[in-house]
Amino acid sequence: MNKTVQIGDLAVEVVRKSIRTMRVTVYPPVGRVRVAAPLRLPDETIREFVLSRQAWIHRHQARFAAQPHAPTLAYCSGETHYYQGRPYQLRVHATTGRPCVKQTEEYIHLFVREDSTLTDRAKVLAAWYRAHLKEQIPALLAHWEPIVGARAEAWGVKQMKTRWGTCNIQARRIWLSLELAKKPVGCLEYVVVHELVHLHERLHNARFWGLMDQFMPDWRQHKAALQAHPTGQESGAGPDAD
């Protein structure tokens, strides 16, 4: 059952779930706060947890407020779309054949039916992003798994609103955000390594970041690029990988 409560100066959505530990998430673009909490956890414990994280929450709310809002995409010729960190101008072409996407040095060409809707065009382009991202991931895993000393039993790509990646430690399965197709390749590598390191350490604690330093010494550079590199079309992915 979901409810919204006032904790300090924060309106917090509390969601009870069959989980062991609490998790707080700040959602862009307006900084909405949501706490996932175990089913029988006392309300006062949730309140104390949120207050202990208040400074962290305010920092991310301020960061989201300072970011320019991405324009609403119409998927029409002339728009700028990003792939691997580079801007491309979109060119939309009417076709009676199968919808597809072709990339050239300066353009992303989107071939769709003349009567296609915005949703139709978005799905075609998303499928193209997904296919290209899935082509990159196996080689990255093959490179980084021996370095990290951990192997993902399964992986996948999905649209995420608040995360660049997630890791199911029990299943040893990682998920990567579709939005990473728009980011520089180093950003994708950082998230892959980040999720593999979670197979050693679940928490973002000193041990976790020490392992990141050991396996990928320049991870801070890639994390900064992930957070700062403009695409103009973020889906709301949060400040960290998970």
Image: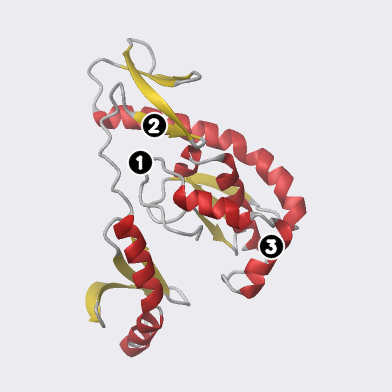
Q: Is residue 97 left or right of residue 4?
A: right
Q: CA distance from mark 3 to mark 1?
A: 30 Å
User: Which residue has dot 3 on it?
Assistant: 213
Return the mark for residue 66: none
Q: Amino acid at mark 1?
A: Gln
Q: Quadrant of residue 39?
A: bottom left
**Residue pictured at 35% horizontal, 83% vertical:** 51
Q: Secondary structure at mark 1?
A: loop
Residue 172 image offset from top left, x and y in percent: 62, 58
Q: Marks 2 and 1: in contact by CB < 8 Å?
A: yes
Q: Which mark is residue 233?
A: 1
In the depicted structure, whether residue 74 falls above or below residue 59: above
The residue carrying mark 2 is 81
Q: Secondary structure at mark 3?
A: helix
Amino acid residing under circle 3: Asp
Residue 184 visible? The answer is yes
Q: In the rendered structure, are the residues bearing label 2 and label 3 in contact, judged by CB atoms less than 8 Å apart?
A: no
Q: If you read the primary sequence from the N terminus, does the residue marked by circle 2 or circle 3 appear first?
A: 2
Whole-number angstrom distance, CA of label 2 to CA of label 3:
33 Å
Q: Residue at x 36, y 61 (%)?
A: 63
Name the residue nearer the viewer: 25 or 29.
29
Residue found 28% across the figure and 35% down from its top: 73
| Drawn side of residue 77 relative to residue 149, left or right | left
Q: Residues within 10 Å of mark 2 (few under 14, many from 20)?
A: many
> Reading the chain from its start, which is encountered first: label 1 or label 2?
2
Query: Could you tell me how far apart the alpha carbons at marks 1 and 2 are, in whole angstroms?
Result: 8 Å
Q: Residues within 10 Å of mark 3 (few under 14, many from 20)?
A: few
Q: Amino acid at mark 2?
A: His
x and y percentages locating residue 204 in the rendered image: 56, 70
